[in-house]
Structure formats: C-alpha cells, structure tokens
Image: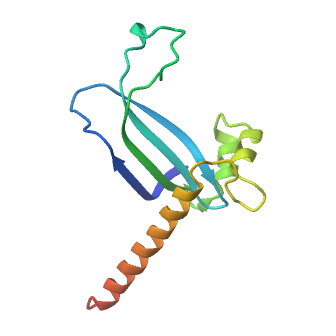
Amino acid sequence: SFFIVTASMIRYRREIVPFKRFDVETSLVGLDDRNLWVYQTFHHHVNRENKQEESDGPTRGKILAQILTQAVMAKPGKGVINPRAWLEDNSMYSIRVLDGIMNEKGENIESIFDEKAKRFTHLEDILKRSAANYDDKVPK
C-alpha cells in the first residue's frame, strides 16, 4: 500500500534552525471514503530531563510549523482504496477511535479542524480550476 499526498498546506510560524533539534507531533484528524487528513506540528525541542514531573506547563516547545495534509491510500493493481479499511487492518487505531473520527456519512464529527478542512478543500478547488483554465489556453 502507498500513502499518496494529494494536497498539503504548510504554515511556518518560526524559523526551523538547521541542525537544531525539534519534535514532530502527528494526528489523524479526518477520514471519508476516499481521503484522510493528517495534521502535524513541529515544536521547539524541550529537554524533558530538566522538566519537573508535576509542572503545569506544556511538555512541548513553541510551534515552529503546522502542516495539514490530504492523502489517499492506494494498492498496486487496485488503485485508491478506502482509508478506513486500510487503517482497520494495518494500524494501531481501534474501530472505536476511527468511529470518533468518521461517522456514517463520512463527516468528521469530533475534529477541531472542521473549519480548516473546509477552507483547505475550498482552496484546493480554486487551485484546480485555476490550473484547468491555464491548461486550456496552452497549445497542445
């Protein structure tokens, strides 16, 4: 199986300094019958050995970058496959967790990223139309 990125949006908040440690946190934030959406945050590295166990403060440093990725799962000879079926067979996610990410209609019901996902999809549609308009004007 292949994880194929179909769209991605990156927001850089702070410089990511070469050779300086950072942490990456990855979350599956949405599913439907064709796509899955993954959200990643890059954080300044926090030396956990020096953090107090009872500290109320964050365990990660400030966010350096945020990435929202739309992807599909594909199998050779079969093309695009349902990502939920693949996740049920090949991941650590339980069916209960997947049910919380996707309902019967394929709508993301518990994600704080609903509005971002709608804007992301809208932007993707605009870019597709723009590319199609341009391509129509290019001689064959």
What is the residue that sits farthest to the left in this orientation?
Answer: 18
What is the residue that sits farthest to the front in this orientation?
Answer: 56
Identify the residue at image location x=49%, y=69%: 122
- In the rendered view, how is the structure colored? rainbow
Quadrant containing the C terminus in the rendered view: bottom left
Is residue 89 depicted above or below 104 in this figure? Answer: above
Where residue 22 appears, as percent x and y from the top left, is 34, 28
Where residue 76 appears, as percent x and y from the top left, is 55, 57
Identify the residue at image location x=27%, y=88%: 138
Where residue 51 appears, as percent x and y from the top left, is 43, 11
Q: Nearer the viewer, residue 9 or 136?
A: 9
Q: Nearer the viewer, residue 124 or 82?
A: 124
Q: Write down the quadrant of residue 129 in the picture.
A: bottom left
Identify the residue at image location x=73%, y=37%: 94
Identify the residue at image location x=51%, y=66%: 121
Q: Nearer the viewer, residue 22 or 80?
A: 22
Is residue 45 depicted above or below 117 in this figure? Answer: above
Q: Write down the quadrant of residue 14 in the picture.
A: top left
